[in-house]
Amino acid sequence: MNNHSDNERNYDQDRLERHVWERQRTTGLSRRSVMRNLAGLAAGVSAFAGSPLRSYGQSAPPIVKPTPPDKFRILGTNRETLFQAFKGQGYLTPASLFFVRNHTSTPRIDADTWSLSIEGSGVARPITFTLDDLHALPSVTVTRAIECAGNGRSFFTSQQKQTVSGTAWLLGAIGVGEWTGVRLSTLLELAGVKASAVDVLPEGLDSEVGTSGHVRRPIPIGRALDDDVLVVYGLNGELLPPDHGFPARLLVPGWIGIANIKWLGRITVYEEPVFTTWNTTQYRFFGNPVDYPGDPILTTQTIKSAFELPFPATLKPGINLITGRSWSAAGTIARVDVSINNGATYTRATLKPNSNGYQAWAEWQIPWVARPGQYTLKARAVDDLGNTQPLTVPYNSMGYLFSAIAGHPVTVA
Ligand SMILES: Nc1nc2c(c(=O)[nH]1)N[C@H]1C(S)=C(S)[C@@H](COP(=O)(O)O)O[C@H]1N2
Ligand SMILES: [Mo]
């Protein structure tokens, strides 16, 4: 049962209208046309009820690949990569080690019958692509991170003593892959995208989430047409694995994880702003009107660092080569400083040569002659634009974008 329109109307009419008004300023719509658009959106969504979309995997386990406990932490339908598992793994995250964030569960999709449709009033020529069609188009291969908006969320509680909702990740809800696919702009142009297009709505073929419908997160047309936004079918030189979006997913480099919709089945182009659960009640900064007036919608990720150590860790006294990774959604890492005394003093870490990618991560290391005792290690990165990690980040009730310096407890014994 497809219930999107009911949900869209009921979840919080006041808030929705406020969002529409915000958007109206930038799109120049009149109030009358905004209300028409809302009604049209609801009607348009229920018209999809008879679409060929199928629900998959209702009773299957949420994740297909093995996620052994020495490499992953189980968090409901999600799997966090244990950061120590990245040690010695090289620059790219193997598909087997990539974190999994599923709002429901991994669908099993038959590539032979699968297709991706581009439709909606914002295109002149609705079109569908099979996997063979995608493979036949000019391909692009890039190395980029995908990182969940909530990565690091547990530190809001453990470090800032704040109560936040959502999956209590440490820092392992990130992976860096070599992605291969086609430009979204190529597909949109083949569909005759109109100058009047406003928002693009990619939609996953995984099960509907409660009454919110299929996972789908709008992207403004300006971002959707950027050269770096891809529909990818390859990860690290292989086909995408089921858990990571087979047959095809979106890649929106530098943006929060949810922008990278997995298991694409349909991309709808709208001529008006579009609202789903994933840009209204989720993935916004809520609960802090001072730092985040108007509950802004999240777009880009931030900058973080993590040690390739168990959390907490126990080390032997003597020389320990401490390793870690830092990453910035805005560019490349320029330097990393490490503290073994809870931030009292820092020493510059050595960046590993040829291990520092744009919108990916940098590997680093620093030797430590460790004496028995209890320590809090800290790592602080600076990117090539001068962005750095603060001591604290402003509270938001859903615990997004924790980019502050994270303390790592270590016992030397
Ligand atoms: N269809 C669909 N796409 C999705 C999701 C989902 O549950 N369903 N989760 C999103 C979120 S919140 C994140 S962080 C990334 C995670 O990608 P991964 O599981 O390949 O690591 O996928 C995004 N794309
Ligand atoms: Mo996410």
Image (cartoon, rainbow, N blue to C red):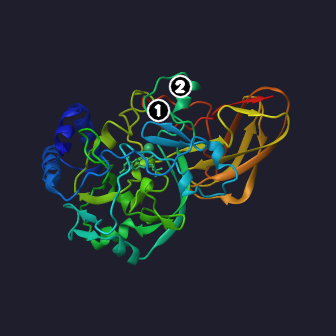
Q: Quadrant of residue 221?
A: bottom left
Residue 156 screen position, x and y as percent:
53, 28
Q: SS class of the residue under badge 1?
A: loop
Residue 330 visible here: no
Label 2 CA crowd tier, 10 Å (few <14, some 14–19, many 20+): some
Q: Residue at x 70, y 35 (%)?
A: 378
Query: Residue 351 — which label?
Result: none
What's the residue type where badge 1 is placed? Gly
Is residue 65 rendered to the left or right of residue 115? Answer: right
Residue bearing the label numbered 1: 399
Could you tell me how many numbered marks the image carries? 2
- Is 196 or 85 nearer to us in this picture? 85
Q: Residue at x 21, y 68 (%)?
A: 126
Q: Which mark is residue 157?
A: 2
Q: Residue at x 53, y 51 (%)?
A: 98
Figure quadrant, ligand 2: top left
Give SS at disc 2.
helix
Q: Mark 2 CB in 8 Å range of ligand 2?
A: no
In the rendered structure, the answer to whether residue 43 lies left or right of residue 140 reads left
Q: In the rendered structure, are the residues bearing label 1 and label 2 in contact, judged by CB atoms less than 8 Å apart? A: yes
The image position of residue 343, as x and y in percent, is 72, 30
For the N terminus, the image quarter is top left
Q: Earlier along the polypeptide chain: callout 1 or callout 2?
A: 2
Q: CA distance from mark 1 to mark 2?
A: 9 Å
Q: Residue at x 56, y 36 (%)?
A: 170
Q: Position of residue 235 (x, y in %)?
A: 50, 62
Q: Is residue 297 visible?
A: yes
Q: Residues within 10 Å of mark 1 (few under 14, many from 20)?
A: many
Left or right: residue 130 compared with residue 231: left
